[in-house]
């Protein structure tokens, strides 16, 4: 008898992609949980999520409202048929406050694990984490438990703490931790449907709102696509793959300098950008950037002030040189093909510039 896979955060960007991939490649039943304030919001999210899923698999899908902030978020959901839990729900904003990070990312993970313990047929609990749970750690980031090296923002801390909780729970339930990179496109085409810090920062650079930029050109920044991470996660959810901690990123990782060069090569092919004759921003260390942000907060206003503030939550991370090991991922997915990071950044930047960050698409819709 086939099992049931339950997803938390199914209405999120990655959660929806993961659900669609699992549905397309398997035969099991799927329970998709979303957070909603009322019935109207739940119905709206359910309808939008349904458009992202394979229509031929709709009879295998059910939906439920789950708010991880509540003491008993899963309510009357039946744990008996559930064989896998994919915990993708999280607040992923890099500027998330401590209270929200604690309530959703940390305590929410604890509640999801406690409910998973009630599933008598559970074969795997997969925590979707981030490579930046490594925080201020430098050097090699292995596919194993991470030390507390300090953190650049509350988001990083909360994902590290979630991992710690999951590792403790692995003593009595089957747990895997999947650390994902920054997703900058849907697939190798470079198409972008949801913006994050990567896309928003490129927008600031394109419009000349950042004359200096925090970071070390040699810092490696793992980027990939929703298609790659979804395929990797589906593979790692296979019960034939052992539980463990996996850095779900390509072997090849571009540096900040390479990504900036790729972006500005695209920018400089644009007529409007060339006419403005804007110079590439100078690099600075995170301390100098932080001083500039603080000084601006005391007297700045407008677009430049907003731009500085939007980069501040991850500025220090751009100065930390580290390298992510992927040996475990490669062992259990030996033939995987990952997009070249520089080619992907070029494709994504081209899409952003051509559509003016989606504005042209909205105007013609």
Image (cartoon, rainbow, N blue to C red):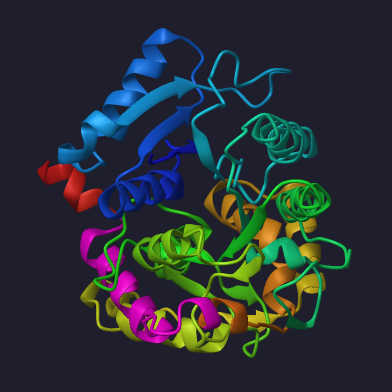
Reply above or below: 14 against 132: above
Q: Residue at x 49, y 30 (%)?
A: 81
**Residue 324 shown left or right of residue 280 in the figure:** right
**Residue 241 shown left or right of residue 100 in the figure:** left
Extreme-front residue of the structure: 1
Along the line of sight, which residue is nearer the eye, 161 or 100?
161
Q: Is residue 344 magenta?
A: yes
The C terminus lies in quadrant: top left
> Would residue 9 be seen by someone viewing this image from the given angle?
no
Q: Main secondary structure of the magenta part?
A: helix
Q: Residue at x 74, y 31 (%)?
A: 103
Q: Position of residue 257 (x, y in %)?
A: 55, 88
Q: Position of residue 99 (x, y in %)?
A: 78, 33
Reply above or below: 321 against 196: below
Extreme-left residue of the structure: 364
The part of the image, by quadrant, that contains residue 256 is bottom right
The N terminus lies in quadrant: top left
Reply above or below: 125 against 337: above
Along the line of sight, which residue is nearer the eye, 14 or 75?
75
Q: Is residue 69 magenta?
A: no
Along the line of sight, which residue is nearer the eye, 105 or 358?
105
The part of the image, by quadrant, that contains residue 43 is top left
Extreme-top residue of the structure: 39
Q: Which residues are magenta?
A: 331-357
So how many labels did they put on this image? 0
**Residue 227 shown left or right of residue 38 in the figure:** left
Q: Residue at x 78, y 48 (%)?
A: 298
Q: Position of residue 286 (x, y in %)?
A: 76, 72
């Amino acid at each position: 008898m086939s099992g049931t896979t339950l997803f938390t955060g199914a209405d999120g960007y990655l959660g929806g992609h993961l659900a669609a991939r699992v549905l397309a490649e398997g035969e099991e039943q799927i329970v998709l949980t979303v957070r909603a304030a009322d019935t109207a919001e739940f119905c709206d999210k359910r309808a939008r999520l349904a458009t992202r899923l394979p229509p031929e698999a709709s009879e295998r899908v059910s939906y439920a409202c789950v708010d991880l902030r509540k003491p008993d978020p899963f309510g009357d959901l039946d744990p008996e048929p559930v064989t896998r839990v994919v915990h993708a729900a999280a607040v992923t904003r890099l500027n998330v406050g401590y209270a929200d990070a604690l309530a959703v990312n940390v305590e929410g993970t604890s509640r999801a694990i406690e409910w998973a313990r009630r599933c008598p047929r559970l074969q795997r609990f997969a925590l979707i984490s981030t490579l930046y749970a490594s925080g201020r750690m430098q050097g090699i980031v292995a596919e194993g438990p991470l030390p507390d090296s300090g953190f650049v923002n509350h988001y990083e801390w909360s994902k590290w703490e979630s991992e710690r909780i999951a590792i403790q729970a692995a003593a009595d339930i089957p747990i895997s931790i999947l650390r994902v990179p920054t997703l900058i496109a849907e697939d190798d085409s470079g198409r972008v449907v949801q913006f994050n810090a990567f896309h928003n920062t490129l927008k600031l650079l394109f419009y000349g709102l950042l004359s200096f930029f925090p970071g070390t050109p040699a810092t490696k920044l793992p980027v990939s696509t929703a298609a790659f991470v979804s395929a990797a996660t589906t593979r790692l959810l296979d019960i034939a793959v052992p539980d463990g901690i996996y850095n779900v990123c390509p072997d090849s990782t571009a540096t900040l300098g390479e990504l900036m060069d790729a972006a500005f090569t695209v920018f400089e092919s644009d007529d409007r950008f060339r006419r403005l004759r804007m110079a590439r921003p100078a690099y600075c260390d995170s301390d100098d950037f932080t001083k500039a942000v603080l000084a601006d907060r005391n007297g700045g206003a407008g677009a430049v002030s907003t731009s500085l503030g939007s980069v501040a939550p991850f500025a220090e991370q751009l100065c930390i040189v580290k390298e992510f090991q992927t040996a475990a991922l490669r062992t259990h997915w030996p033939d995987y093909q990952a997009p070249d990071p520089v080619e992907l950044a070029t494709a994504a930047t081209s899409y952003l510039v051509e559509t003016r960050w989606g504005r042209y698409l909205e105007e013609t819709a």
